[in-house]
Image (tube, grey):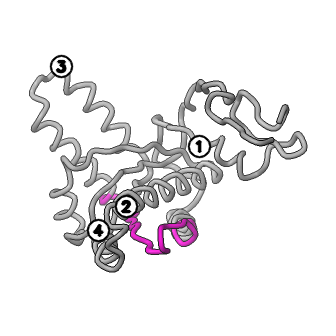
């Protein structure tokens, strides 16, 4: 196993990082974003659609749903987040830092909203009652895989992103603002755009602790 995995957590094939792992390695939480992008809006939508069509889900149920926001709709989302947090954060000093953070998300090119279509899960629970308790977990796993795949694909294309979870605080306002079906549950928000100040180095736990091998 020596040489197959490095402390940088990048897999190698014959000593050369694979294109797939290189794309994963490029995925970072990028918070300094502008409204520029290496791809056009239409190309970004095509990229998200292509990824969404390939990400797996339990029983191929495909409960993941996505809305990509640009322009005024993107800004509307972060106004909703701002107003929702202002209503619960009463201290002006504390809110100043929050407001600055939200402004950074608003400055990005757009936002990907991730949802779980709960009707899919409920139908599966009725069809396969012996697995009923597992389907909500599997739906969350499917959504997480989609988030990770889109995030990595954007990074590979030279577009930075980060992942936020202001739900359920903003759920009702988002549903009303964007005409979201009642059975779609908001899971995460991903602002994206051109990286203006790259994220710093990250630490990895020793891979011998994270990945163990038996029988080799």
Real-space Cα separation, disc 2 to disc 4, in angstroms: 13 Å
Q: Is residue 52 magenta?
A: yes
- Of tags 4 and 1, the one toward the viewer is 4
Q: Which mark, residue 134?
A: 2
Real-space Cα separation, disc 4 to disc 3, in angstroms: 39 Å
Mark positioned earlier in the residue sequence (2 or 4): 4
Q: Are marks 2 and 4 in contact (CB under 8 Å)?
A: no
Real-space Cα separation, disc 4 to disc 1, in angstroms: 28 Å
Mark 3 lies on a secondary structure that is helix
> For the point 20% across and 55% down, which residue is it?
171
Q: Quadrant of residue 31?
A: top left
Mark positioned earlier in the residue sequence (1 or 3): 1
> For the point 35% across and 51% down, which residue is it?
188
Mark positioned earlier in the residue sequence (2 or 3): 3
Q: Which residues are magenta?
A: 51-73
Where residue 211 sits: x, y (%)?
65, 36
Real-space Cα separation, disc 1 to disc 3, in angstroms: 33 Å
Tell me: 100 left or right of 12: left
- Name the residue that disc number 4 marks: 118
* Front residue of 7 and 17: 7
- Name the residue that disc number 1 marks: 27
> For the point 27% across and 45% down, which residue is it?
166
Q: Quadrant of the C terminus?
A: top right
Q: Residues within 10 Å of mark 3 (few under 14, many from 20)?
A: few
- Of tags 2 and 1, the one toward the viewer is 2
- Name the residue that disc number 3 marks: 93
Residue, far right:
14
- Of tags 2 and 4, the one toward the viewer is 2
Q: Are marks 2 and 3 in contact (CB under 8 Å)?
A: no
């Amino acid at each position: 196993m020596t040489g197959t995995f490095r402390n940088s957590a990048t897999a190698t094939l014959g000593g050369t990082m694979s294109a797939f792992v290189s794309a994963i390695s490029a995925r970072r939480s990028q918070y300094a974003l502008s409204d520029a992008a290496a791809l056009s809006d239409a190309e970004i939508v095509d990229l998200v659609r292509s990824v969404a069509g390939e990400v797996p889900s339990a029983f191929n149920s495909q409960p993941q749903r996505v809305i990509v926001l640009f322009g005024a709709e993107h800004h509307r989302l972060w106004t909703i987040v701002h107003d929702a947090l202002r209503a619960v954060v009463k201290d002006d000093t504390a809110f100043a830092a929050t407001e600055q953070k939200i402004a950074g998300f608003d400055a990005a090119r757009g936002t990907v909203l991730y949802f779980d279509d709960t009707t899919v899960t409920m139908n599966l629970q009725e069809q396969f009652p012996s697995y009923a308790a597992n389907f909500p977990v599997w739906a969350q796993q499917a959504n997480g895989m989609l988030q990770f795949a889109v995030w990595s694909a954007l990074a590979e294309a030279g577009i930075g992103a980060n992942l936020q979870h202001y739900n359920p605080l903003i759920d009702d306002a988002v549903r009303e603002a964007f005409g979201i079906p009642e059975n779609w549950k908001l899971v995460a928000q991903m602002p994206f755009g051109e990286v203006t100040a790259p994220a710093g180095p990250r630490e990895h736990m020793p891979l011998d602790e994270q990945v163990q091998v038996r029988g080799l």
